[in-house]
């Protein structure tokens, strides 16, 4: 459903207002290129009330390399969506040619996002500036590495006191997993479940209701400002969880399992450099190993002859 919502949103915001009135046959390579490039320099849309008559926007400083990368990445994702729709039309013989969009290439080098980690001192500083139930939400994120949606769906019965784990029934890739907790994490969840109904939301707002996506953001932003930390998202606390494990020597396969990944590819991409021995151990295990230092019979004979001649 998240992918469906994203596709509809991109079509509504970026595609239909600019290209929606055109016939597909009128889509030239140049017109599509101008549309793609305009998305990069256009103001960024920010969260707007449903009752608002005008969308809130924020200007983007494209002179900032990271801001430019993000905008180009957004343009690439939207271009991929448009191409998919147009290719479907071409495959079903609804249009005569795919020449224009087939020749339009996405921006290059847009996938190398800078991943932000909070060290132990920064994590504690952030927790100290969080108030009420927000502190529990942030603490749970830091000590489980779970996504916000996974945390919001947790119920009291998902915490296993005996095993010291919390059960994530549904994750992004559809796989369920048990997340082992540290003593501090187990103590937090023990307090949260005390005397409560098994089916009640485990993490709630101050009014006792379950968290919804937009409801923590204002408080979280304020906590970051009070802690004097640069702007990060709640999701990036997941990176802090994983980076701490890698730095403390956890195998990447274990980290991938804790995060709910089906393999180690994403973990290697984002966290392998944090393990000082990872690259060295991989090279030593897989690269050719020859005894180049040993002196061969031919080299020894040449060395002996050269010395005799001298």
Image: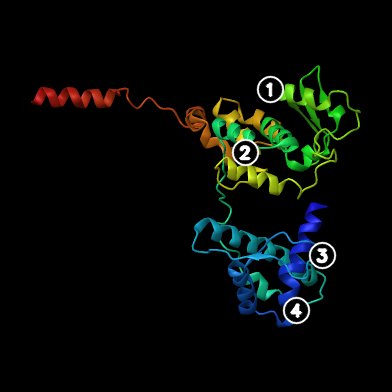
Q: Estimate how packed mark 1 is, as few (under 14), some (14 to 19) or many (20 or more) residues with alpha carbons within 10 Å.
A: few
3D distance between C-alphas at marks 2 and 3: 35 Å
Q: Is residue 186 left or right of residue 113?
A: right
Mark 2 or 3 closer to N-term? 3
Mark 4 or 3 closer to N-term? 4
Q: Which of 291 and 166 lies nearest the eye of the viewer?
A: 166
Mark 1 or 4 closer to N-term? 4
List the residue tagged with mark 3.
51
**Foreground tag (4 vs 2):** 2
| Residue appearing at x 53%, y 64% in the figure | 62
3D distance between C-alphas at marks 4 and 2: 43 Å
Secondary structure beneath dot 3 equals: loop
Tag of residue 24: 4
List the residue tagged with mark 2.
239
3D distance between C-alphas at marks 3 and 1: 43 Å
Residue 183 placement (x, y as % from top left): 69, 19
Query: Do the residues under discs 4 and 2 have CB atoms within 8 angstroms?
Result: no
3D distance between C-alphas at marks 4 and 3: 34 Å
Mark 3 or 1 closer to N-term? 3
List the residue tagged with mark 1.
184
Query: Based on the displayed image, in which of its 4 quarters is residue 133 positioned?
Result: top right
Mark 1 or 2 closer to N-term? 1
| Residue appearing at x 40%, y 27% in the figure | 290
The residue most toward the left is 310
3D distance between C-alphas at marks 1 and 4: 59 Å
Secondary structure beneath dot 1 equals: helix
Tag of residue 238: none
**Foreground tag (1 vs 2):** 1
Q: Estimate how packed mark 2 is, as few (under 14), some (14 to 19) or many (20 or more) residues with alpha carbons within 10 Å.
A: many
**Foreground tag (4 vs 3):** 3
| Residue appearing at x 77%, y 68% in the figure | 12
Query: Based on the displayed image, in which of its 4 quarters is residue 241 positioned?
Result: top right
């Amino acid at each position: 459903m998240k992918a469906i919502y994203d596709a509809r949103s991109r079509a509504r915001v970026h595609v239909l207002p600019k290209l929606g009135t055109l016939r597909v046959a009128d889509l030239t390579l140049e017109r599509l290129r101008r549309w793609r490039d305009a998305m990069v320099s256009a103001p960024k849309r920010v969260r707007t009330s449903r009752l608002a008559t005008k969308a809130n926007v924020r200007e983007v400083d494209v002179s900032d390399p990271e801001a430019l990368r993000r905008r180009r990445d957004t343009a690439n994702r939207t271009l991929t969506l448009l191409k998919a729709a147009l290719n479907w039309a071409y495959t079903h013989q609804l249009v005569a040619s795919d020449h224009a969009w087939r020749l339009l290439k996405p921006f290059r080098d847009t996938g190398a996002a800078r991943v932000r980690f909070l060290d132990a001192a920064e994590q504690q500083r952030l927790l100290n500036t969080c108030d009420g139930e927000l502190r529990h939400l942030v603490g749970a994120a830091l000590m489980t590495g779970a996504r916000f949606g996974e945390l919001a769906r947790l119920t009291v019965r998902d915490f296993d006191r005996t095993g010291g784990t919390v059960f994530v029934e549904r994750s992004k890739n559809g796989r369920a997993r048990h997340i082992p907790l540290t003593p501090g994490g187990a103590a937090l969840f023990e307090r949260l479940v005390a005397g409560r109904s098994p089916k009640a939301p485990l993490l709630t707002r101050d009014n006792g209701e379950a968290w919804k996506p937009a409801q923590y953001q204002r408080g979280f932003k304020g906590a970051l400002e009070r802690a004097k930390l640069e702007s990060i998202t709640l999701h990036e606390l997941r990176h802090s969880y994983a980076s701490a494990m890698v730095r403390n020597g956890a195998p990447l396969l274990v980290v991938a399992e804790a995060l709910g990944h089906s393999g180690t590819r994403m973990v290697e991409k984002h966290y392998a450099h944090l393990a000082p021995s990872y690259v060295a151990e991989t090279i030593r295990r897989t690269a050719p190993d020859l005894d180049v230092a040993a002196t061969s019979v031919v080299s020894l004979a040449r060395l002996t002859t050269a010395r005799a001649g001298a």
